[in-house]
Amino acid sequence: MQSDFPSQVQRKIQKLCDDFQRQLRNGERPPIESFLEGWTGDESVFLRTRLETIQDDLNASFSVGGEEFTRSQLDVTSDLDDDNRHKPAGNAPTVTADSRPVKPLSGSGNRSGAGARFMPGQLLADRYRIVSMLGRGGMGEVYRAEDIRLGHTVALKFLPVERAGNQRHLEYLYKEVRLSQRLTNPHICRVHDLVEVDGQHCLSMEYIEGEDLKSLLRRVGPLPEPKALELAHQICDGLHAAHQVGVLHRDLKSANVMIDERGRARIADFGLAREKNLIDPNEGLTGSPNYMAPEQMARNETSVQSDLFSLGLILFEVLTGKPAHNGTSRDEIGRMHQRDEAEQAILKRNDISPAIVTAIATCLRRKPEDRPSSVAAFAETLPGRLSLSDAFRSGEMASPNMIAEVRSRNSTIDRHRIGWIMAACISVLIAVAYFSTTFQQFGIDRSLTSLADDASEYRELLGWPAGTSNVYRYVANRPAMRWFSNNAAAPDQHESGNRSYSAYESSYFWYRESPTPLIALLPYWKGDGFLVVDEVRPSILAPDGMHMRLDAQGNLKYYSAIPSTEFFSSQDSSAPDVEDTEFEDAEGNPWWHQPLELAGLSPSQISRLQPIPPEFTPLGFANERRSWILPKTDDELSSRVNSAASIDNANTDTPIAARIEQMVRIDAARADDTVTYFRIVMPWDDASPVIPWNGFASRNRVLAILIITWIPVLLGLIVWQVRKNLYAKRADRLGAIRLAGFGAFTVIMIWLLGGTHAVDALEMDTLVTALAGACLVYVVMWLAYIAFEPVVRRHWPTSLVSWSRLLHGNWNDSLVGRDVLIGCTVGALAAISKHLIFDLPSLWGDATFGLPNVTNLTPLHGLRIAVGEVTTAASQAIVYSIFFQLFFLIALRVLTGRTAVAAPIFVAVLSTMVAAQYEPAWLAFVVTAIEMSVMAYLYLRVGLLAAVTMHFVRLMRKWPMANDISSWYIETTGISLCVIALLIALAIYAGRPQRLSSADAAY
């Protein structure tokens, strides 16, 4: 603007400015109005602006020991009218964590200037020993000090005495400390604390040897492209870290970027920073006008994009050596914004690489929506950073941050977003319709409470005293299902309400009652929960305990009571020592007649029972034992093993009649006049009366030996790999901590929600056990993730992109949403595929049954336990996906050296393992091979997050589904559907269109 005036006018203006500056340096305070006498129009406006700028610059500078300093960054601009100024920094290199440099003192830098508030050696707050004064200015004094408690050097910045009691400036200090302490990035200057010394407040900050970027550029001019790009990526890294925790800088400029003694960029001065959600729209305009975004200048709107605009101006200055905007008034800067001068200026630079020009130009666009959506997205467009594909081709391992910040090169998410939403919703609806029909085959029509009432009534009828604590559950009868699958030559022809008899044997109800609290002290990881009471924990041999089994219709299958000494002492007479003594009930029936009736036998069937010598030993004491078999007619003997032909015409239409025809024998025992044991032994039952615990089954001994042998070896290998990765700084420590923390959290939640609790002192023991289990899970998951995740990142980095974003807190991301939708779709279809193993054979006349293998009955036991099962499903999905399938796949990749070889082996091995659990095995292998092929594709081409989601949805789809709103387990169905619907809704929200231009993975 000065060039528009005649040369004579320009010389007069320059002379007045020199005189004004000389008087200020001499300590005088000449009024600006005296220099404006005789000046009018634009010349007067321009002269006033120049004089005010000189005055501000001189107020911002100070002198100690003959050397010149600039004030600290605490002098933030509060109003636009006070901020139309430039604050040139000095030339020299010692700075604090503030935005404006402080020159070193002459000589050693250990002398204090005249008039200093504190002298070298003075101890403040019994902690800080003053070393030297770094500078003094309009906003206070800065001292170098030693923190004698922590043993490191800090910079202490004091407010001026006249502003020490100013609440507004003090609030700025508090805000700066609060926000700065949330930022721990190596490219952000740290603020330690706000200290009060004799009623005076000061900031304790990181002390940095170096200079600010503005001073560096004035001293050396524009930087070479390699160094400029290095600094650009460092600034991006620090700014992105601030944005990740919701902090906007709002005053980003070259004077607020420090270059330390190692040449690294450090962002400083968060005095004007605010949280995104806590910005006051009525707050006055703040910041430096020449570095403001257009919307910030016009409407005081600040956002990630406004910080990006300031970042673009800084990079322009770094590469050209001069600011893009050098206006002297708000109107002038506004006109520059309207003309897009900064963007046009960078686009005209032929001496800068086109890729750099294009990247910076996107930051300098006038409309915020036209700028990059995040700093990470912008950083990916800048050359100079090793891309994911470059790292993969060169054999270098991408860092976790690089994985999480990979930017999309195509519009795959945008093109297929609606398709994946529809696929997820349709597949879930198909699964719901399918399962709601299939689950009806279970025959679970009676609620838990009604069966519990029956069990309590049966106990009373059998003469056993009531206890104070009871626990009951529905469980799947897996031995029965295996027996039917192996012995059924054709579908069961005996049906009631279109249900086969085998369906009624697919599950049973057990009930335990005791005079003492039933608490499980021993964790059983293989069971339906963690620290839950089941049929063997606590011990079924505890005195005065009672254990009972009913089928789904409420017929007695098993009963055992353990008499104690007190039980016999309460009887009317001593127990006779003869077995032929007959005890009869009030109706004159023998003692064993009552349990037979409760088992569902008709009078004609009871009369046809044939006694046999008892060969069983009851769990508790018994005076008398009895065993029977039910002989079959010639027609029955010629029928199939699973025929449901009935003998009693009165019972030919009930499933219990078919069950009676299948039984091997009936056992019963009494102690005095009380029944203490009863059991219907079926072909699939163990002959022993003691319920076996699978953990100690003989068939598992070989597996147990292998586990015990290999655990120390495997643990040693993991520890060795962990040490190697930590030493090489390849491990994703943050991801490992969060994943392991989630694992420990799920253990506690599973115990709280899914465990069995009682008002008893032993509850504290279960708490200790749960905490120990949580610690064990934390350590194991942390070690395993640290050991194997870098290997996956080296070979298949793209599979971890969405997973890393989620793990690092960026759940609201388009790629995260896409992978969750894919996982929901595949998970619902995978759950259906398991049922095809049992449904397809019926098309060609083969009979098979296996619903319990693909159905989880645990959620039926109440709202608390159902919510706990959601947590269990999440933890199981993570463990199975990461610590079993993915690590097994990467192990095969390392051993074979080729993914094309590892993937088929992965599919074949896992398909064989799964198929061995089903009949027919060949069909199970085919169905499972298809599923495992899809899983391998998810791991290698889509992402780990999709695989984890797939397993979670598959587990949730194993819950009972009701197709009748009046069903007693409709609540369980609702919880399952709500969880999956919420998951899909969150995925849709994360992948909404306005985020599709953000950093998304490229494949």
Image (tube, helix red, strand yellow):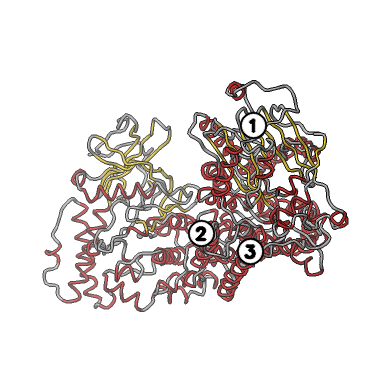
Residue at position x 22%, y 67% from top?
A: 49
Graded by Cα atoms within 10 Å as few (under 14), some (14 to 19) or many (20 or more), the crowding at tag 3 reads: many
Which residue lies at the image location 25% right of the left edge and 47% below the top edge? 170
Is residue 382 at all visible to an observer of this figure?
no
Q: Is residue 491 above or below residue 751?
A: below
* Label 2 – label 3 distance at C-alpha: 31 Å
Q: Amino acid at mark 3?
A: Phe
Q: Residue 315: where, in percent of width, then height?
A: 45, 64
Residue 165 placement (x, y as % from top left) = 19, 44
Other-residue count near label 2 (Cα within 10 Å), few / some / many at <14 / 14–19 / ≥20: some
| Front in this rendered view, residue 408 or 298 | 408
Q: Position of residue 926 (x, y in %)?
A: 79, 63
Q: Where is residue 246, by image quadrant?
A: bottom left
Instruction: From the viewer's perspective, tell me whether residue 191 is left or right of residue 840.
Output: left
Quadrant (top left, top right, bottom left, bottom right) of the N terminus: bottom left
| Viewer-proximal residue among 809 and 47 | 809
Disc 1 crowd rating (10 Å Cα; few below 14, some 14-19, many 20+) is: many
Q: Which residue is mark 1?
A: 674
Looking at the image, is mark 3 or mark 1 nearer the viewer? 1
Secondary structure at badge 2 equals loop
Pinpoint residue 503: horizontal percent, then vertical percent. Answer: 70, 57
Task: Give the amino acid at mark 2.
Answer: Trp
The residue singled out by tag 2 in the image is 811
Determine which residue is flagged by label 3.
435
Q: Quadrant of residue 906?
A: bottom right
* View extreme (front): residue: 588
Badge 1 amino acid: Thr
Q: CA distance from mark 3 to mark 1?
A: 44 Å
